[in-house]
Image (cartoon, rainbow, N blue to C red):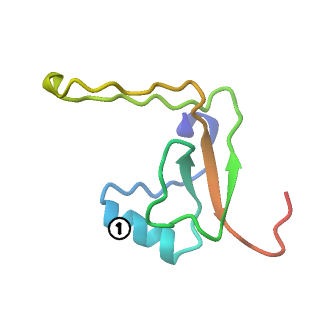
Amino acid sequence: MCRVQMPTSRFLVQTNLFEFEELVRKSSLPCFTTNLAKDDQNLLTGRIKIPVTDPEANVTYYLACHSQLNTKAAVSNDCFLSFVLPEMPNLVF
């Protein structure tokens, strides 16, 4: 979706969690989040969340667990994606 809808954008993809958290914490780079993600590390403190409302922007999550755990997962259709920017005093939306 990103390459189709935002062809001139450049994305820095991070697969290492520690490195990703450091980039979010120490830089002014924007990032993406969802309403289902917990911010236990307070990474998004001081940042502005902008909901992505385009119909093409949807997120599918898959849950895998061992059948012997006998747990149930709550499934929600109310998941949305947000673009997260650092707070900037002169930024107007």
Q: Is residue 75 visible?
A: yes
Percent position of residue 36, x then y: 51, 42
The N terminus, quarter of image: top right
Residue at 75% in and 73% down: 88
Q: In the rendered view, would you say 77 is above or below 23?
A: above
Residue at 63% in and 51% down: 83
Percent position of residue 78, x then y: 60, 29
* Left or right side of 60 for 54: right
Residue at 56% in and 24% down: 77
Query: Which residue is at the far left?
Result: 68
Tell me where residue 86 sits by quadrant.
bottom right
Amino acid type at mark 1: Glu
Number of numbered tags placed on the structure image: 1
Percent position of residue 28, x then y: 59, 72
Q: Is residue 8 visible?
A: no
Return the residue nearer the eye: 5 or 39. 39
Q: Mark 1 sits on what residue?
A: 19
Q: In the rendered view, would you say 66 is above or below 7?
A: above
Residue at 44% in and 27% down: 74
* Left or right side of 71 for 85: right
The C terminus, quarter of image: bottom right
Element type where label 1 sits in the image: helix
Percent position of residue 62, x then y: 36, 28
Q: In the rendered view, would you say 87 is above or below 57?
A: below
